[in-house]
Amino acid sequence: MHRLLLFNACIYTQDPSQPQVSAILLQGERILAIGTEAQTLPAEERLDLEGRVVIPGLTDAHLHLEHFALGLQKVDCETPTRQECLQRVAERCRQTPPGQWVLGHGWNQNLWPEGFGRAADLDAVAPDHPVYLTAKSLHAGWANSLALRLAGISAETPDPPGGKLGRDAYGQPDGILYEAAMELVYRVLPEPTPAEVTEAIRLAQPNVRDRSAAFQDDVAEVGNLVEDSRYGQAESRDRAEVPRAVPGQPAVRAVQGQSDLHAQVNRQQRSHADSVTT
């Protein structure tokens, strides 16, 4: 099998007797040798990492993977203006069957020149979908009129203990829910199906991998997703590929195999050369 020698690197081994070495010999997914020994063994290919840092793949032992993955499926409302947020909602609605909920997160009225949104703003771009967007602070939510109706919120709805409903000058709900009032909408949101959770986790894997996490232990309330019968096959919690070369200065990551490592090193070398010439 093809052997790859990575050398001229700063490699952290987590071995107290040999905490840092400059070379590592790989064969497929196995480490054959490190340090001086690695450089004395035959290798079909040698790759100079030019001083870059290599560390073991990281294990995130406290990742709410289901929550994280489902969050990535929401509309990203962290925009510089309210109008841009509304445009993103409108785009999502065009991709979503009428009647299905459109969820989002991340808006911050303090950064928007227009300030807080209103139900009417969402109604204009999403007349056929219930829409609910949580603030970046998680202390407020923004709903359109259809979502308010489904939640049973009207002018007669009292403010719940610990919460407040935003209202217009006539006492009608204006679409903003503060603190405990957010629960009025949360309780009518549909639970994601096992298939939806599985697909969300699958789509989240590149995001996890980009953060150099080799493995994840999920601490969702449902328990281990692999063992939970709701999620069927074990691929419902795919393990991300192990990063072989993790960012140093400049960054290199080899999560897709040796060819990807070559490509990333070459890109970094070109980038470094460009920065020197400019």
Image (cartoon, rainbow, N blue to C red):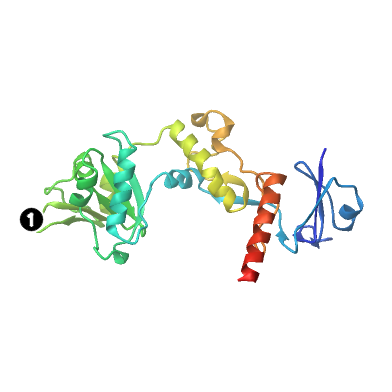
In the rendered view, does 254 fall on the left or right side of 82? right
Can residue 22 be seen in this snapshot? yes
Q: Is residue 91 above or below residue 265?
A: above
Q: In the rendering, at what x and y percent does residue 97 appear?
A: 31, 33
Q: In the rendering, at what x and y percent does residue 212 appear?
A: 62, 52
Q: How many marks?
A: 1
Quadrant location, the C terminus: bottom right
Residue count near mark 1 (Cα–Cα under 10 Å), binned few <14, some 14–19, many ≥20: few
Residue at the extreme front: 277
Quadrant location, the N terminus: top right
Residue at coordinates 70% horizontally, 45% vertically from top-left? 259
Q: In the rendering, at what x and y percent does residue 172 appear?
A: 12, 52
Please give the residue where the numbered disc 1 appears in the rendered image.
170
Q: Is residue 98 above or below residue 7?
A: above
Can residue 247 be seen in this snapshot? no
Residue at coordinates 85% horizontally, 45% vertically from top-left? 44
In the rendered view, does 45 fall on the left or right side of 96? right
Q: In the rendering, at what x and y percent does residue 133 appear?
A: 31, 50
Query: Regarding mark 1 in the picture, which secondary structure is present there?
Result: loop
Residue at the extreme right: 40
Residue at coordinates 21% horizontally, 51% vertically from top-left? 121
Q: Amino acid at mark 1?
A: Tyr
